[in-house]
Image (cartoon, grey):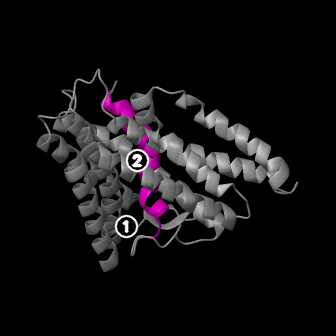
Amino acid sequence: MRQRIASTILLWALVGASLWFFRTTGALVLVTLISVLTLREFYQLMHGAGYDPFDKFGMFLGGLITLSPWLDARFDGPLDLLLPFAVIVFAYRLLGERTPETRVESLASTLFGIVYVAVMLQYLVAIITPLPRDTITADARLLLCLWLVATTKFCDMGALLTGMAIGRHKMAPQISPKKTWEGAAGGIVFSMGVGALIAWLARDQFPAHMTPLAAAFMAIPIAITGIVADLVESVLKRRANMKDSGATIPGIGGMFDLSDSIILVAPIGYFLFRLP
């Protein structure tokens, strides 16, 4: 637990310093790095499950796809073709680089990783990327991204603390035996509180519809989806017979163990923020 707390504090300090000193550029680098490292660990899980994804080129294309909203705003290129391009490339490669017994699994696991990680996390980049028609500042976009990440991760923390204190009823014992319904409820309450607090502190920057009360209720689907995302990662780890996705972060595990809940909430946050 001490390692987990220390790692959590260090990570929040890193995020805060990146946003404070490097603003949009720092946030874009962080999200892209998280996407690539998460995809790397996803492919490791697929290898552990007996599949054989095209991990290296998959990570490269995944990084580009995650960054594509910013690239599109900056260069106005045909970046919506990256995912179809990936399908075509891996369809060619599997015929010559995989055996008949693994071809379907190689293609499926490679593309699922790109969609599940890179495509979903590109919505964080879309939240961060300033546009000419914006009615909010670039810093406000960073704060919205911070709100989304904080409400998601504090749900994890609230669920852990509440579950340790009063958790009795198992939520999904065959998937994640330690998760309880009491912990989930506590996580949602934590998320609502953090969401309302950040909205109040950033009230001069946030869009008009994001009042503290509205932000508290917006945090509910964010928290619930984050819990589901965490369970999905547990399913993947169980299929690969691995406890953690990696050992990148002491006390937490791998990058996927850190980013799992953010993956599914990114498009929901983008929708709730009503960004152009």
In the foreground, 170 or 30: 30
Whether the residues at callouts 1 and 2 have beta carbons within 8 Å, the answer is: no
Residue lying farthest top? 133
Can residue 196 be seen in the rendering of this structure? yes
Mark 2 lies on residue? 224
Q: Is residue 222 above or below residue 74?
A: below
Q: Nearer the viewer, mark 1 or mark 2?
A: 2
Dividing the picture into quadrants, the one containing residue 85 is: top right
Residue 199 in percent (x, y) is at: 18, 41
Around disc 2, counting alpha carbons within 10 Å, would you say few (fewer than 14), some (14 to 19), or many (20 or more)? Answer: some
What's the residue at 39%, 41% (across, down)?
124
Return the residue nearer the eye: 56 or 16.
56
Q: Position of residue 133 (x, y in %)?
A: 29, 20
**In the image as oriented, which residue stretches furthest toward the bottom?**
2
- Identify whether 259 is placed above or below 176: above
Q: Position of residue 247 (x, y in %)?
A: 48, 73
Measure the C-alpha gap from mark 1 to mark 2.
17 Å
Q: Amino acid at mark 2?
A: Ile
Q: Which residue is mark 1?
A: 167
Span shown in magenta: 253-274
Where residue 272 is drawn, which disc sits there?
none
Horizontal side of 161 relative to 124 (left or right) equals left
10 Å neighbourhood of mark 1: few (<14), some, or many (≥20)?
A: many
Q: Is residue 170 visible?
A: no
User: Would you place residue 112 above or below residue 271 in this image?
Assistant: below
- For image coordinates 22% across by 23% down, the residue present is 135
The numbered mark, 1 or 2, whose residue comes first in the sequence reads 1
The answer to if 266 sits in the magenta stretch is yes
Position of 200 relative to 14 (above/below): above
Q: Quadrant of the C terminus?
A: top left
